[in-house]
Image (spheres, rainbow, N blue to C red):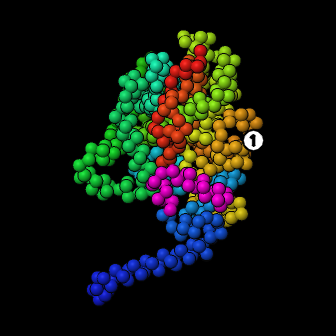
Amino acid sequence: MLLGYFVLDLGGLKFCLFAVAVLATYFILNAFYQLYFSPLAKVPGPWYTSISRLWLLSKALKGGVVFDIYQLHQKYGPFVRVAPNEISVADIQSVNRIHDLNDIFPKAKIYETMGAGLDSITVKTDHEAYKRRRRAIGNVFSNSNLNILEPVVRKHVVTCVQKVKREITLGRTPDLLKWVHFMSADIIGELSFGKDFGMLEDEIVNPLVEDMGAFLILFGLRSWLPIIGSGALKSVLSYIPSFKLYKILGSADRIAEYGKESLANVRRDICNCKNGLIRPSIFSKVLENASNPDAKLPLTADQMRDEAFAFMLAGSDTVVVTAVYTIWAILRHEDARRKLEADLKLSKLGPEDTCHGDLNGFTNQNLQNIPYLDFTIKEGLRLFAAVQMSLPRTVPAGNGGRQLGLYFFPSGTEVSTPVYAIHRDPVLFPDPHSFKPERWINATDDMNSASLGFGGASRMCIGSNLAMMEMRLLIAILFSSCPDIGLASSCTDESMEMEEFLFIKPRGQKCEVVKNSSVG
Ligand code: HEM
């Protein structure tokens, strides 16, 4: 009311000028406070990141923010103020503290914004809620459970390699990115929803997997622009006659519907199963007492659907990118390739004759005894883990905050650990941009704890064991079955340059291979 009189009294234009003046004054005073009086004022960084979040927002939306943050660390050192309330921390002792299991720095609120409407462990920021959900999901990827899941993984890996091999034998240039995408989507689809998407068999992308790709973009966008997740904006946008937009906006609902139906089928199968031969699935353990359809399960149907959805989002493209980049690096480094092939042969686990051999010796367990394979994957994860972004956490309550390095950070400050920059720390990883699996032969504790490819200890990737199994089997079976594989001329260093938006991916969007005429 008072404001109404004030507006009338001043007149519209004057009121606007007044409002602009108030905002400008607030902005200047706040900038002054942030630069000189805030508890974070002493942390180095460009002046413009201290006074507003705009720099971070614009870089994140443009894509490639991880490279910009790396440049800032090169210039300002291990602690950089990247936004008024956010510090990027690349100092390894402090990184360890941030991800410590004994003094939890919870996930930052940005995860909740990103996952609005998704009831999944991935986006839980309250640590007690996270622990409850972790217990309810159970040890789905423990080693004993992985043994049960291995035949499903193996089946799809072998099919994928057979398809690549067939293509190169026919003189074609198969795209590894495409085939491994088919493979990993089929694996996680079958493990989560009880049936694969038939992508390897049909050799095309399933529309539902397309939906998931669309949803992943939404997921990334709304972490920075929460309005994108709002129902009101969705209703407005749905009036725009665009098929692409329709697909993106409807993606979450279609996936949810599919997830619910599939999981109900899985449960029905288990209830009807008379001979005890239950199809292996991530949720078999959760559904263990499903023989009684009225039994109370640790997760509701909706929660299970959301977790399955999150596993699809977190466990498909991540494996594709990491595995394909690692294979590309091996193919590009003759020395690494020779050593890997020699170790695979020496293990006598694989086929004698690469054309018609028996691959059954290549089990997940056996492959863990081939050191060079392990070093190669570790180095692949260092340089090419799909998630190279910063992992944002909040300084916990208690004691007013926490000391990290030379600085005291008040509770509530956001501290993020920039994976891309930490993995390229020249002190921990000399010649950091080069692919050198040998560096892992005598790995130090610091090298191991700086390896954040699967995240930090307190919120480690749930699917890391599954991802490692997929990568071990794929690399071993590919290099043993296709000794004549090489990079196609289309697969250049430029085409494989990294782009980043949520996950990394090659600029050229493909990684083609070919039959290498110089080999056997
Ligand atoms: C090479 C492949 C993979 C990479 C590089 C990777 C990387 C990561 C990273 C870095 C995190 C931590 C994110 C953070 O702290 O914000 C994470 C979390 C997670 N990952 Fe993975 N991941 C991979 C495969 C998988 C697979 C196969 C699954 C599931 C089947 C999976 C499921 C999850 C889940 C559910 C979380 C959230 C855990 C939590 O919030 O505590 N990931 N992953």
Q: Secondary structure at mark 1?
A: loop
Please say if 285 is above or below 79: above
Amino acid type, residue under disc 1 in the picture: Thr
Mark 1 Cα-neighbour bin, 10 Å: few <14, some 14–19, many ≥20? few
Q: Quadrant of the C terminus?
A: top right
Tell me residue 323's x, y (percent): 55, 33
- Relative placement, left or right, of 125 versus 44 is left
What's the magenta bit mostly, secondary-structure-wise?
helix
Is residue 468 among what the camera can see?
Answer: no
- Residue position marked by numbered label 1 in the rendering: 444
- Which picture quadrant has residue 373? top right
Tell me residue 409's x, y (percent): 64, 64
Tell me residue 225's x, y (percent): 42, 57
Q: Nearer the viewer, residue 70 or 358?
A: 70
Q: Nearer the viewer, residue 74 or 466?
A: 74
Please say if 513 is above or below 296: above
Q: Nearer the viewer, residue 318 or 254?
A: 318
Please say if 250 is above or below 258: below
Tell me residue 272's x, y (percent): 38, 23
Q: Which residue: 31% across, 87% down?
A: 10
Please say if 10 is above or below 418: below
Q: Which residue: 28% across, 53% down?
A: 237
Q: Which residues are magenta?
A: 55-78
Is residue 37 among what the camera can see?
Answer: yes
